[in-house]
Image (spheres, helix red, strand yellow):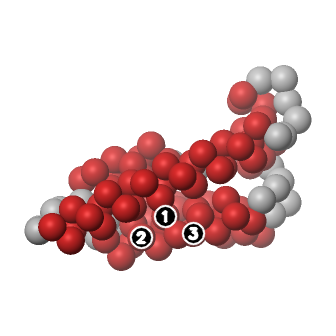
């Protein structure tokens, strides 16, 4: 899901004033919360190792997961990211986290 990369992109967002700083902090907090929820889902999967659990979670027949992976791949191809783009990516991960296994 490229979560470490997305955290880096959030940290790299340009801050021009107080509200940009607030927005960046909110994005970081939301992504961390979604990451915790997604890790919880992965831990429920079968597998003897963390790698097996992740592989099984990613191999699920889930249209929401496929859409999210495709969207994140598209976002990763962008030269630079802005607040709206990162916000959409973080919200999409939140929808995936809420969707459950």
Give yes or no for contact between labels 3 and 1 (Cβ–Cβ under 8 Å): yes
Residue at the right extreme? 46
**Is the residue 41 above or below the residue 25 in the image?**
above
Residue that appears at 16% across and 63% down: 15
Residue that appears at 21% across and 62% down: 21
63 or 20: nearer the viewer: 20
User: Alpha carbon of mark 2 to alpha carbon of mark 3: how far?
Assistant: 9 Å
User: Alpha carbon of mark 2 to alpha carbon of mark 1: how far?
Assistant: 5 Å
Q: State the image coordinates of residue 99 (x, y, percent, origin top left).
A: 75, 65
96 or 52: nearer the viewer: 96
* Residue wearing tag 2: 87
Q: State the image coordinates of residue 23 (x, y, percent, origin top left).
A: 30, 67
* Residue wearing tag 1: 90
Badge 1: residue crowd in 10 Å (few <14, some 14–19, many ≥20): many
For residue 4, side relative to residue 64 (left or right): left
Can residue 69 be seen from the camera position used here? yes
User: Alpha carbon of mark 3 to alpha carbon of mark 1: how far?
Assistant: 5 Å
Residue that appears at 80% across and 63% down: 62
61 or 93: nearer the viewer: 93
**Is the residue 6 above or below the residue 21 in the image?**
above
The quadrant in which residue 55 appears is top right
**Is the residue 64 above or below the residue 10 in the image?**
below
* Residue wearing tag 3: 92
Badge 2: residue crowd in 10 Å (few <14, some 14–19, many ≥20): many
For residue 58, side relative to residue 35 (left or right): right
Residue that appears at 11% across and 68% down: 17
Residue at the top extreme? 48
Who comes first in sequence, dot 2 or dot 3?
A: 2
């Amino acid at each position: 899901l490229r979560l470490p990369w997305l955290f880096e992109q959030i940290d790299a967002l340009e801050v021009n004033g107080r509200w940009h700083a607030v927005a960046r902090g909110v994005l970081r907090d939301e992504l961390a919360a979604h990451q915790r929820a997604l890790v919880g889902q992965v831990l429920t999967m079968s597998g003897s190792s963390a790698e097996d659990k992740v592989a099984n979670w990613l191999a699920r027949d889930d249209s929401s997961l496929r859409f999210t992976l495709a969207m994140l791949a598209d976002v990763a191809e962008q030269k630079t990211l802005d607040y709206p783009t990162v916000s959409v990516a973080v919200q999409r991960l939140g929808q995936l986290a809420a969707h459950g296994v």
